[in-house]
Image (cartoon, rainbow, N blue to C red):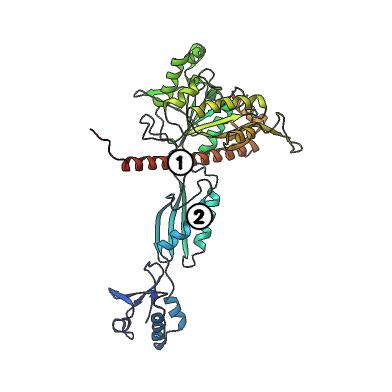
Amino acid sequence: MFIAAFFRVVPNKLGGILTTSPSVDIENNFDVFRKFQFMNLWIIEADFEKDFMKITYFCVFFYKFNLCLNKVKVLFRSLVGIDQVLEKLSTVIDPDLKKDIVSMGMIKDLELNDSNLKFTLELTTPACPFNIEIEDDVRRVIGEITEVENFDLKVTAKVMEGRSLEDDTTMKTVKNIIGVASGKGGVGKSTVSLNLALALSQTGAKVGLLDADIYGPSIPLMLGMKDSYMQVEENKLQPAISNGIQVVSFGFFAEQSHQAAIYRGPIISGILKQFLVDTDWSNLDYLIVDLPPGTGDIPLTLAQTIPITGILVVTTPQEVASNVAVKAIGMFEKLNVPIIGVVENMSHFICPNCNDKHYIFGNGGAQKISDQFNIPFLGEIPLNSGIMSGSDTGKPIMISNPDSLSSVAFRNAAKNIAGQCSILALKLKEEMAAENKNDETAPEASTN
Ligand code: ADP
């Protein structure tokens, strides 16, 4: 005789839907409520706080018709509103960006249908260091809304642009460019660049690796691609593909790479520019550029040719390495290139027998740099013979032994780097918005 169900989404209100029943004259008895008829259904609405008396009356009315109170209670279940959901979600803060996930536009495709809630949480990078924490927080705050009975959450990521694509029409398909620099050679910069690229790629990001060490390209060897070469199609270099990453290296040009030692300034800069701009990079979230050590032509060209997200500094713990790394940082700072942070390679050795940490090259080098320049310390990679043999045999540790402690260390560093890229991207976005606002409000220049 009587069916009650709910379907309207009315913030802070109660709602109900009644089938017309022969014994209840809804049309003439419910003037106290906002109501309307839809086919053979009556839809009613009430504001719980304001209409409390009316609701009581309504309950009594139904009671008269021998409806058990239970049913009446069910009928007056509160409906949740989108504003209530968003209000709850806006209490979730991205720990990296220090902004709430609603104002950051991370909530997409929200659908609220009665007590069924569905939306997509779009993180700023698949390598987000806090992805589990943010997802847990989202589930917790939604769990606090008692009216939501079914919650369907999808988590995705869309990497933010950490470089101004407006200012760079030449590399529109690359969202972030990370230059990897070191003060001196042999600190493991190429090893770190490669394994970080693989770690980022394994999170689902689209990654490219540009081996910009034109005098001593080592990436092809480290990837077991000594005999690979790059094609040219429609005047564009086609990167070689290895383990899902797009790779460009002067090492793929076998003959020319032997002559690189005699190349100087403008030629070297020209080669790098071509590798950057004339390569058919296919929609990259991150392009890692493995720079030669020091502060020569190539790092300078990278910093001056195109907008980049920032520089990652690799150093080893000993003072000789960290002291020269400081010089590289100084150069990039002078050129106004952001420093993403510092990674310490060969930090320590974990004894496979006793699990003790041994600081073979001393410790604290990278931390000192981090403190001195106020730049983030993004990770420490242990000294491990597996890393070295993997490089020599073309099987990077991220591929050959992804569960090793070294791989875990690369993964952690990669997440921190991606997090810092999102922070720099947000900063850039805010700066650009402020600039656009200034342009709009600035009085037009007088032509007199
Ligand atoms: P760079 O690019 O700074 O010149 P490389 O990446 O070529 O340095 O590394 C120099 C050598 O050190 C290589 O043989 C490499 O395999 C080894 N190596 C780098 N990092 C580690 C590490 N964490 N543990 C063991 N060997 C390493």
Q: Amino acid at mark 1?
A: Lys
Indicate the amino acid at tag 2.
Answer: Val
The residue shown at (37%, 31%) is 168
The local secondary structure at tag 1 comes to helix
Q: Secondary structure at mark 2?
A: loop
**Apparent side of residue 178 relative to residue 317 in the rendered image (left or right):** left
Query: What label does residue 92 carry, if any?
Result: 2
**In the image, residue 241 lies at what x, y percent?**
47, 30
- Residue at left offset 63%, top offset 27%: 322
- Residue under circle 1? 427
Residue 119, given in percent of the width and then of the height, sits at 43, 55
Residue appearing at x 67%, y 33% in the figure: 364
Q: Position of residue 440 (x, y in %)?
A: 31, 42
Q: Quadrant of residue 416?
A: top right
Quadrant holding ligand 1?
Answer: top right
Viewer-nearest residue: 180 or 114: 180
Q: Nearer the observer, disc 1 or disc 2? A: 1
Q: Is residue 327 left or right of residue 51?
A: right
Point out residue 262 in the picture as x, y percentages from the top left corner: 50, 11
Answer above or below: position of 146 versus 74: above
Most extreme residue toward the front, as rendered?
A: 448
Mark seen at residue 414: none
In front of the other: 367 or 128: 367
Q: Give the quadrant of the C terminus.
A: top left
Question: Based on the displayed image, in which of its 4 quarters is residue 171 positioned?
Answer: top left
